[in-house]
Image (cartoon, rainbow, N blue to C red):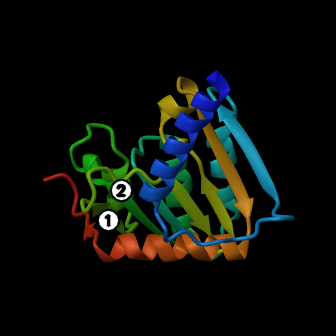
Amino acid sequence: MRITKILSIGLVFLFFFAACSNTQATDVSINNTPAQVYFSPHGGCTDAIVKEISRAKQEILVQAYSFTSKEIAKALVDAHKRGVHTEIILDKSNKSQKYSAADFTFNMGIPTCIDAEHAIAHNKIMVIDKETVITGSFNFTKAAEDKNAENLLILKSKELAKQYVDNWNGHKSHSQGYKGRQ
């Protein structure tokens, strides 16, 4: 009896969540996709991101909720200076954060936009050269590296990267160009 009741409750939750789920999912097969997995604190996430940015040859697209990592900001500026097309979309909280990299990247000539369309623009992704996807819970912050329990995935897949680039472009279409702290 107890198992039946637990199963019934579980099925109710399953049907509830299935009814509420986003039906716009895109199936992507990621078999044989090279991946690197990192965990923080002190798991090397920031170093891994900086390393991938340093390998970029053509383009880096960034979406971030919080972005205060000096190492990542510097790596993006260095990539921009060596001719890698770099663009950033940030959550609206970056307009008022005391230590946001938005001012730094904007002042260094990297196109920086603010996505204020959503309650929170909570994406944490980078797409490098339409082939490498960096994602996970890891915010691009010092606290994410040193204090928080976070995860980071680095995936090498053109098929997967295309999905992220398409999503990035959708968010860029409703974002506003950042003009520095006013």
Q: Can residue 65 be seen in this view?
A: yes
Q: Where is residue 167 in the image (x, y as percent from the top left)?
A: 47, 71
Q: Give the amino acid type for the residue marked by disc 2 in the picture.
A: Leu
Query: Could you classify mark 2 by the number of other residues whose Cα lies within 10 Å: few (under 14), some (14-19), or many (20 or more)?
Result: many
Name the secondary structure under disc 1. strand
Residue matched to label 2: 90
Which residue lies at the image location 74% right of the left edge and 44% below the top edge?
37
The foreground one among 47 and 136 is: 136
Q: Is residue 7 above or below residue 165?
A: above
Which residue lies at the image location 45% right of the left edge and 58% below the top edge?
19
Residue 10 sits in which quadrant?
A: top right
Residue 87 sits in which quadrant?
A: bottom left
Q: In this view, does 108 lie above or below 103?
A: below
**Considering only order in the chain, which callout, 2 or 1, is on the residue closer to the N terminus?**
2
Q: Which residue lies furthest to the left in this view?
A: 182
Name the secondary structure under disc 2. strand
Q: Going by the image, does 5 lie left or right of 66?
A: right
Q: Where is residue 137 in the image (x, y as percent from the top left)?
A: 54, 42
Q: Give the amino acid type for the residue marked by disc 1 in the picture.
A: Cys
Q: Going by the image, does 113 lie left or right of 40?
A: left
Query: Could you classify mark 1 by the number of other residues whose Cα lies within 10 Å: few (under 14), some (14-19), or many (20 or more)?
Result: many
The foreground one among 27 and 66 is: 27
The foreground one among 42 and 123 is: 123
Q: Is residue 19 above or below residue 29?
A: above
Which residue lies at the image location 61% right of the left edge and 77% below the top edge?
162
Task: Using the image, tell me which numbered label, if any, was put on residue 25.
Answer: none
In the rendered image, which quarter contains the N terminus?
A: top right
Which residue lies at the image location 21% right of the left edge and 63% below the top edge?
179
The foreground one among 9 and 161 is: 9
Residue matched to label 1: 113
Q: In this view, does 87 lie above or below 47?
A: below
